[in-house]
Image (cartoon, rainbow, N blue to C red):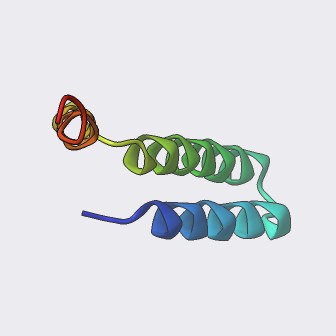
């Protein structure tokens, strides 16, 4: 799985290429790809439902002793 930081780096590369592109259609496609990479970066940095459940169990384990 690609880490969140790697998605951010891919997004930055797309933005850099879009800025130097002379073709508006290519620049637009690269910006759309950068946006998708940023969205994926945010999704991959969020814990999954299973991870959230385990964190709750870990937190609750110390209570009631």
Picture mark count: 0
Residue drawn at 54 percent across, 67 percent down: 10
With 8 as the anchor, is 43 left or right in this view? left
Residue drawn at 19 percent across, 29 percent down: 64
Which quarter of the rendering shows the N terminus?
bottom left
Name the residue nearer the viewer: 61 or 27: 61
Residue drawn at 49 percent across, 51 percent down: 41
- 61 vs 22: above or below: above
Name the residue nearer the viewer: 36 or 42: 42
Name the residue nearer the viewer: 60 or 13: 60
Q: Position of residue 59 (x, y in %)?
A: 28, 40
Which quarter of the rendering shows the C terminus?
top left
Which of the 4 image quadrants contains residue 22? bottom right
Which of the 4 image quadrants contains residue 51? top left
- 35 vs 16: above or below: above
Q: Position of residue 3 (x, y in %)?
A: 38, 65
Residue drawn at 68 percent across, 48 percent down: 31
Name the residue nearer the viewer: 60 or 41: 60
């Amino acid at each position: 799985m690609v880490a969140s930081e790697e998605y951010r780096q891919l997004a930055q590369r797309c933005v850099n290429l879009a800025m130097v592109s002379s073709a508006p259609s290519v620049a637009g496609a690269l910006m759309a790809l950068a946006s998708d990479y940023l969205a994926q970066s945010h999704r991959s940095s969020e814990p999954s439902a299973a991870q959230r459940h385990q964190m709750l169990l870990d937190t609750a384990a110390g209570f009631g002793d």
